[in-house]
Image: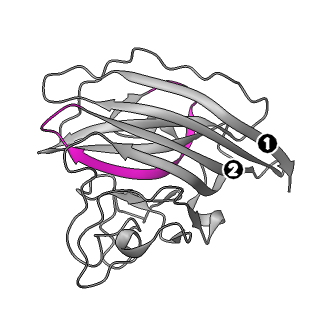
Amino acid sequence: MKIASIAIVSASALVTLSHAGFTGWTAFVQRSGDYYLVDVFAVTTGEPDRMLNIYDSNISTTAAGNFFQAAGNASKTWKPDTVTFTSTRAAIDSFMTIGSTRFAGDANVYAGSTTNGDPNFTGTSWNATPASAPANTVPTLAGWYTGDPPTTSLSENLALVSGMRLGTQGDWGSWAGHLVVSASNASIINWAASATVKDTVSGITVQSNFAASFAVPAPGAVALLGLVGIASSRRRRA
């Protein structure tokens, strides 16, 4: 697997949240054959933070064919494959997740096995049927959540994540999505969504909305990154 060459032009948040659990989005890119693998993380303020859900998303790409999903009932939906456990950061398949799962003696990082979709994931976009085609777009306002926050959604050290990083803010994050696009042309991934993150030390739960644009390079090209805005934020104590 080859790591894509990335150059960062700008990466700035408009607002800094004091003692907040969620401060924005970042991504890591790797090249694997004919595809770029883009892992998106919700940046958090520390290891005790746990991501509970993502909602009201608007996710799209300019890549030809949109997002790639593998064929087969277990993998042609946005839900991670929890049957054959192939939804890893090396997978040539797009999926959403809340956090990650690791198994003793296994070097792979797997998507959270308890990730579920909300009603805005419609039709074949979340639950595959034998006659359906792989879903290559994300429904507007789609959301997903974890049914087991204590075991899968703990923030991880971003310095240990493989790939070239798009953005530099924050040292901790929770894995939110694995997006696969064609490497035949340069493309943009637009990711806007709200997330709920809980600090397990203070008990504070933060809900915020951020948007980011990740530029993925074609072979030999230079990627540009623009990280934009925060639409809203609010804090409450659990």
Of 58 and 199, the residue lying toward us:
58
Magenta stretch? 167-186
Q: Residue furthest right?
A: 237
Q: Is disc 2 in contact with disc 1, using a CB cutoff of under 8 Å?
A: no
Asked if residue 202 can be seen in this view, the reply is no
230 drawn magenta: no
Q: Is residue 103 left or right of residue 228?
A: left
Image vertical order of residue 5 relative to residue 97, above or below:
above
Q: SS for tag 1? A: strand
Given residues 105 and 212, the one toward you in this image is: 212
Q: Determine the residue positioned at 35% across, 62% down.
A: 106
Residue type at numbered disc 1: Arg
Mark 1: few/some/many CA within 10 Å (<14, 14-19, 20+): few
Amino acid type, mark 2: Val
To which quarter of the image does residue 16 belong? top right
- Tell me the quarter of the picture where residue 47 sits: top right
Indicate the secondary structure of the residue bearing disc 2.
Answer: strand
Measured Cα–Cα span from mark 2 to mark 1: 11 Å
Q: How is the image coloured?
A: one colour
Which of discs 2 and 1 lies nearer the camera? The answer is 1
Q: Quadrant of the N terminus?
A: top left
Residue 97 on image: x %, y %: 47, 59
Q: Which residue is mark 1?
A: 234
Q: Which residue is mark 2?
A: 197
Residue 10: where, in percent of width, then height?
Answer: 46, 16
Among the two numbered marks 2 and 1 on one chain, the one whose residue lies closer to the N terminus: 2
Q: x and y percent of residue 64 in the render?
A: 19, 44
